[in-house]
Amino acid sequence: MSPSITLLIVIAAYIGVLYWSASLGRGRGDNDTFFRAGRNASWPMVATGMIGASISGVSLISVSGWVQSTQMTYLQMCMGFIVGYAVCAFILLPLYYKWRLTSIYEYLRLRFGDRTHRTGTSFFLLSKYLGASARLYISCLVIHELLLAPLRLPFALTAGGVVLLIWGYTRRGGIATLIRTDVIQTLCMLTSLVLLFVIAAEHLNLSLQGVVEHVRSSEMSRMFEWDAGSKQGFLRQFLSGVFIVIVMTGLDQDMMQKNLTCRDLRSAQKNMCAYGLCFLPINFVLLSLGILFCAIYAQHNVPPPADGDLLLLHAISSGWLGTLVIIPFGLAMISAAFSSADSALTALTTSTCVDIIGLEQRDGAAHNAQRIRGRVHLIWAVALFLGILWIKGAGQSSIIDTIYVLASYSYGPLLGMYAFGLLTRRQTLDRAVPLVALLSPLLCGILDSLAPRLWGYTLGYELLLLNGAFTFIGLWAVSKKADTT
């Protein structure tokens, strides 16, 4: 039996397990189950599943490939992640649990008003949609190259099939389903990652100690950059890591929705701290895997591809590692694709229903609310499919870099809104908030364009901080002291 057929059977079995796990909800399709899982989830299960949802196929591909251009300096950002998760756990989670929020953007309505609420939600929907499309694109691309490209079938068929399967098992249970399926997906992805590491080490005839020595002696093992002017400078990377986690986890409905399914605040904090500590070692392994794959290219006297996202894919498709390697690699990619996309699809549906439509405030029969939710869920599934095709047409050299740049522009206004709400007692002019939120990323774009020419300085992910600061200043300008009488 060929490896491609074996991989196809493995993936079919994997999808069968996901659908079986989804069926354990015993057919419940009410909105409380879809949005909140009854607020009764076990935190160890949530934490395990969150690892897979956060790592994603983009990390497997892009982080490993990044080692060619930035060595291991990405770990500086990962160190900042730990601080960011602590902020989310001990500052933001207590706020969300205090108000018993279904969507975290309901805080903006309670603190400022309806227009601020809808503005913050709109920025989330845009950013999450683009980020989810980018993550799912790269996973679909790898799956297509491994399975369908040899048959000369169109990429759209792969993308459509993946989105259809994800829509199928999330459309009833929503977040309650994801808590179970994400555990399966995380375990599959981490197991596959370990197998890839072992296969690469065996190909290079390296023992575990040999792998450690090879990684340590590699010129790509440099972790710290102390040049403050470099985009990889420690302080810039560390602070970017802190605030990227705050906005892409703490201010992101996708990531926080699962935390809010835990039984109580203490359980949710345990969950966030547990999975937050996993990212530094996991990303170290991914970067080490990139170093091993660069050594494999050198062993065969072939230069690594200039596009870092192709580092693993080209080596595996070349046949150097044998044909069976496509099985763990393919399983890792499809589990990563499903894990990141299913939670994004559920969060987009939840935020649209709760924040934009106001479904939970409407009067009417429960089955009508479920029908509306079902239509919104389907619309977002179709939108994801179209987003994948758009990104394929546009092309991009580093998907993970693109995701972080998008976050800098689209999550910046959210950072400014929440910071203003938490750090001040002032009340904004609600109708002016949309203008402030639009002007802030526009100013960042202008500054990003002018900085290299005027000051010889290239802005990195600190654009997120500037964006949030501009929003904060703008909100202060259109605010007044809150009436305490």
Image: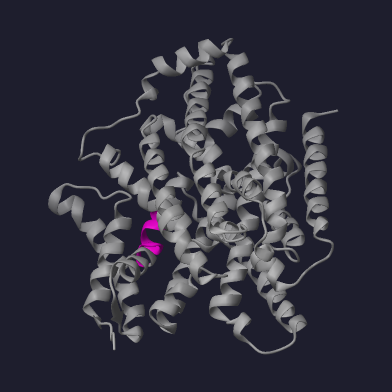
- Could you say which is closer to the camera, residue 109 or residue 410? 109
| 455 w.r.t. 118: above or below | above
- Could you say which is closer to the camera, residue 347 or residue 69? 347
Magenta-drawn segment: 405-413
What residue is shown at x 59% (from left), y 20% (from top)? Answer: 200
| 378 w.r.t. 275: above or below | below
Quadrant of residue 32 in the image?
bottom right
Q: Is residue 122 left or right of residue 179?
A: left
What residue is shown at x 62% (from left), y 20% (from top)? Answer: 198
**Horizontal and vertical percent for residue 441?**
32, 66
Quadrant of residue 194 in the image?
top right
Q: Is residue 445 left or right of residue 154?
A: left
**Horizontal and vertical percent for residue 404?**
41, 51
Q: In this view, does 194 lie to the left or right of 422?
A: right
- Does the segment drawn in magenta span residue 408? yes
Which SS does the magenta portion mostly show? helix
Q: How many labels does the image show?
A: 0
What residue is shown at x 56% (from left), y 14% (from top)? Answer: 208
Q: Residue furthest left?
A: 454
Q: Is residue 406 visible from the viewing direction of this image?
A: no
| 160 w.r.t. 339: above or below | below
- Could you say which is closer to the camera, residue 67 or residue 183? 183
- Does the segment drawn in magenta span residue 79? no
Q: Quadrant for the N terminus, please.
A: top right
Q: Coloring scheme of the render?
A: one colour
What residue is shown at x 74% (from left), y 63% (from top)? Answer: 173
| 311 w.r.t. 266: above or below | above
Q: Quadrant for the C terminus, please.
A: bottom left
**Horizontal and vertical percent for residue 244?**
40, 52
Q: Is residue 342 left or right of residue 206?
A: right
Quadrant of residue 150 in the image?
top right
**Horizontal and vertical percent for residue 226?**
23, 32
